Image (tube, rainbow, N blue to C red):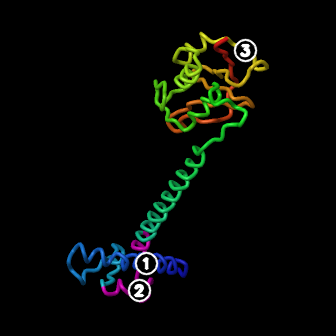
């Protein structure tokens, strides 16, 4: 019971403090200077508006079990909302880090297939798009090769049908990595640049599948 009293006191103290902070805004909206916001659970425990200004004087023992359950639920809802807001902020921050500038290696020619692919990291994914600011996976590979004067078809299976398959041992940066339904630009070291989906856009990532390597322009 002592723990419950402590929990009620803390919860009500926080709620009443919030109420005090809201008083000026409420007064401005209602034009009634002495109107005081009283939380629902304060009203249920027959605490007057004047007493709501004095949370320390409130006696937790006067709270019925049903009101205690209501307070617990309300506090839990506020805590959950706060945690969800913090999580959303953290995800947004992490996403900003993940999609931040990616440094192109100094030995990569910016006008090469790999260099052009690097230049599009961070672009949005749109199904069917072929550049120059939005792409799907085969639209990115088509656009990159097109900038080097090599024309390849759109769509994954069409690229697989028109490219020359090379072994993994012979693969080199600039080749297209293929699996059924997806393609990307191989940049070496089991990594590629590809237009993944709406969530990732164009990104640099590891190759998580067993690829077929395709070569164009030779």
Is 64 included in the stretch rendered in magenta? yes
Could you say which is closer to the camera, residue 38 or residue 182?
Answer: 182
Tell me the CA gap for discs 2 and 1: 9 Å
Secondary structure type for disc 3: strand
Query: What residue is drawn where x is 48% and y is 58%?
Result: 85
The answer to whether mark 2 and mark 1 are in CB contact below 8 A is yes
Which residue is label 3 attached to? 166
The answer to whether 136 appears left or right of 204 in the picture is: left
How many marks on residues?
Answer: 3
Vertical comparison of 137 with 13: above or below: above
Q: Residues within 10 Å of mark 2 (few under 14, many from 20)?
A: some
Return the mark for residue 58.
Answer: 2
Q: Residues within 10 Å of mark 3 (few under 14, many from 20)?
A: some
Could you say which is closer to the camera, residue 207 or residue 72?
Answer: 207
Return the mark for residue 12.
Answer: 1
Of badges 3 and 1, the one in the foreground is 3
The answer to whether 214 appears left or right of 21 in the picture is: right
Whole-percent x, y for residue 218 in the image: 67, 11
């Amino acid at each position: 019971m002592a723990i419950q009293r402590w929990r009620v006191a803390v919860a009500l103290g926080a709620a009443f403090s919030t109420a005090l902070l809201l008083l000026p805004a409420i007064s401005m909206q209602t034009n009634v200077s002495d109107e005081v916001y009283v939380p629902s659970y304060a009203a249920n425990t027959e605490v007057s508006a004047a007493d709501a200004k004095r949370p320390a004087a409130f006696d937790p023992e006067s709270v019925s079990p049903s009101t205690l359950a209501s307070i617990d639920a309300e506090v839990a809802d506020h805590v959950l909302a706060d945690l969800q807001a913090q999580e959303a902020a953290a995800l947004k921050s992490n996403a900003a880090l993940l999609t931040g500038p990616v440094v192109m290696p100094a030995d990569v020619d910016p006008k090469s297939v790999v260099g052009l692919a690097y230049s599009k990291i961070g672009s949005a994914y749109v199904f069917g798009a072929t550049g120059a600011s939005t792409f799907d996976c085969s639209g990115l590979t088509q656009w990159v090769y097109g900038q080097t004067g090599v024309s390849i078809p759109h769509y994954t299976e069409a690229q697989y049908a028109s490219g020359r398959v090379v072994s993994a041992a012979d693969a080199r940066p600039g080749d297209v990595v293929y699996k059924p339904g997806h393609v990307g630009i191989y940049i070496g070291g089991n990594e590629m640049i590809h237009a993944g989906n709406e969530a990732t856009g164009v990104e640099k990532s590891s190759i998580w599948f067993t690829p077929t390597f395709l070569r164009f322009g030779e």
